[in-house]
Image (cartoon, rainbow, N blue to C red):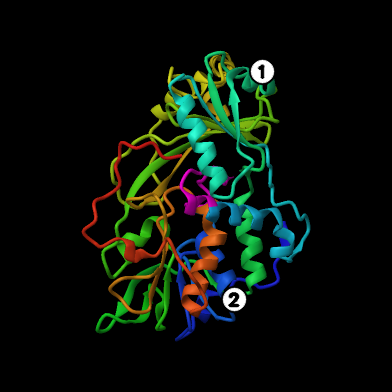
Amino acid sequence: MFNRRTPIEEASTLPSSAPVVIVGGGIVGVASALFLQRQGILSIILDVSDAPGTRTTAMSAHCIRAQFSEPDNVRMMAESLAFYEHFTEECPVALESPDLGLRQQGYLFASTEIADHDDFRQRVAQQAAAGLPDVELWEGDKVRQRYPWLSQDITVATYRARDGWIDSGVAVQAMLATSGVPFFPNTPVTEIVTDHDRVVGVRTSLGTVATDTVVLAAGPWSRALSPEPLPLVLWRRHRVIVSPRPEIPQHGPVTIDANTGAHWRPHRGGALAAWAQPASDTEASWPVPTDPAFVDLILRSERGIGRLSPFWYELVQQISDDDVLLTAGHYTMTPDHRPLIGPATQITGLYLHTGYSGHGIMGSPAGARILAEEIAGTGGDNPFHPSRFDCNVAPPDVERVVI
């Protein structure tokens, strides 16, 4: 889709040393490299896969939104969304097609509970106070006027037109090419080497790279690779992609059931559906195993996406197994559902850029800027600093719905 300016380095050229080693070649690691380059800091990326952004990033729903409640999250996501809105200026690579796949068709959080009116109204006010004045509060009739296929049971919703989704694969490749940072595929990191609580190198299956600065951006593998305990748990998250069907409206928003967490959006003539269900801690793995029962749960159950979009109940009767692709990935969760960005608390030279709690694509550009400024010593206030926790902090509440 583009002409790469900077070829991927061959593993045989793995250097003996590097100023900064980034562990992880998903969108968080690649964004880190881009913003470090903007600070004049050289880095390399080591990744276990044979191409960037092909694991956790690829298994995402690729959604972007600024419609959060917590002010720090609102600011982070709004900054990142603006980065994507101006992507060709931010990443001026020689693209054959400059299309990031940015589709700003909106995010709609909808509820069937009358009691949610006050909460929704309060959330819109909080978002406006945090610098997001364009979130709209809709009554049920307005929802159905705008999107006639939605349920008569919806009583209230919030909507923001600038939210939507992107093609994360294009984003990763273009950011990497723009940065000019060497990317080493098929180079699994086995250990971040320390000496007297200081980083001295990174050990890989192909040799050791000496460095005094490591950025740990390995997503679900961050916990296992970190030389100090991290307040992270992993939740498995399923995703269902439905093949193109004329019955699936392609001009709709990301539609989220605020009462259950089930959500879907248009996807290349079909749909992408997911569900932020409560989950227990698990271990990082690849590929992430799937539960075939999830297809019926999301598409056919009374609490699935058909609850707010009833046309799904009729449509699924016509969908065969060949029309559905089921995959899974991990959410890397922190106790407050906000990322860890900045220096680790116990190991000098270790910088964390992980724990996005399912929002890595949404937040990684702003998070990478914060991370790069921390390393360069040019930053200001950092509300995502890892020091807000200690290693004995309780894990996230697994009963809380996260979208």
CB-based contact (under 8 Å), mark 1 and mark 2: no
Q: Quadrant of residue 199?
A: bottom left
Q: In which quadrant of the rendered view does residue 31 lie?
A: bottom right
Residue 60 drawn in magenta? yes
Instruction: Tell me the amino acid under the disc marked 2.
Output: Gln
Is 138 above or below relative to 184?
above
Q: Quadrant of the N terminus?
A: bottom right
Residue beneath the point at 34% across and 37% down: 400
Q: What is the number of callouts on the image?
A: 2
Q: Position of residue 21 (x, y in %)?
A: 46, 76
Secondary structure beneath dot 2 equals helix
Residue under pointer 1: 148
Question: Does residue 271 show up magenta in the picture?
Answer: no
Label 2 neighbour load within 10 Å: few <14, some 14-19, many 20+: some
Identify residue type, mark 1. Answer: Pro
x and y, in percent, of residue 250 in the image: 69, 30
Cα–Cα span, label 1 and label 2: 48 Å
Residue plotted at (55% across, 74% down): 36
Residue depicted at 55% across the width and 80% down the height: 41
Please provide percent x and percent y for residue 158.
57, 32
Pick out the residue farthest to the left.
392
Label 2 sits on residue: 37
Q: Which mark is residue 290?
A: none
The dominant secondary structure in magenta is loop
- The spot of residue 296 in percent (x, y) is 44, 23
Residue 52 in sight here: no
Give the magenta range: 56-74
Above or below: residue 250 compared with residue 347:
above
Residue 27 located left or right of residue 339: right
Q: Looking at this view, is 314 or 42 the one in front?
A: 42
Up-down relation of residue 229 to residue 54 (above or below): below
